Amino acid sequence: MNVIVAGVDAEPVADAVESEGHSVTVVDVANRPTLEESGVHEADVFVLTEIEQATSIAIAKDLAPEIRVVVYAEGSLPDFARGQADLVVDPRLIDAETVAEELEH
């Protein structure tokens, strides 16, 4: 599975996803050019680790409508992005390893 992890990865979810055997691309800022360069068109999952970059969800979905979006961050996702996220997880409740294991389900 190809996974893009965007934002500051304070809870090392990228490492956990990679340890599950998936291909991981990490980007700091998930704007349109960066997502295109990161291979969003071929990605299966987009993991966002910063609520402040919520607009990147719409960009990822525009570029790859079938991509699954997982938000792994503290805080509330803005209304405009909430409907496009497939899963929103607070890292204080579930560890990165469990999120990585569940990506295939």
Image: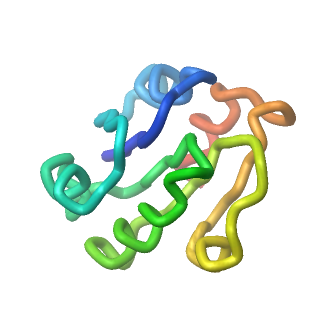
Residue beneath the point at 61% across and 79% down: 80
Q: Nearer the viewer, residue 68 or 21?
A: 68
Residue 90 picture location, percent across and down: 78, 42
28 lies left or right of 15: left
20 lies left or right of 105: left
Does residue 15 sit above or below 74 in this rendering?
Answer: above
Q: Residue furthest left?
A: 37
Q: Nearer the viewer, residue 90 or 45?
A: 90
Does residue 53 sit above or below 81 in this rendering?
Answer: above
The quarter of the displayed image where residue 27 is located: top left
Residue 24 picture location, percent across and down: 33, 34
Give the number of marks.
Answer: 0
The quarter of the displayed image where residue 93 is located: top right
- Quadrant location of the C terminus? bottom right
Residue 17 picture location, percent across and down: 48, 31
104 lies left or right of 32: right
Residue beneath the point at 26% across and 73% down: 63
Residue 91 picture location, percent across and down: 75, 34
Does residue 60 sit above or below 29 in this rendering?
Answer: below
Residue beneath the point at 52% across and 27% down: 9
94 lies left or right of 44: right
Q: Residue furthest front?
A: 52
Looking at the picture, the colour scheme in use is rainbow
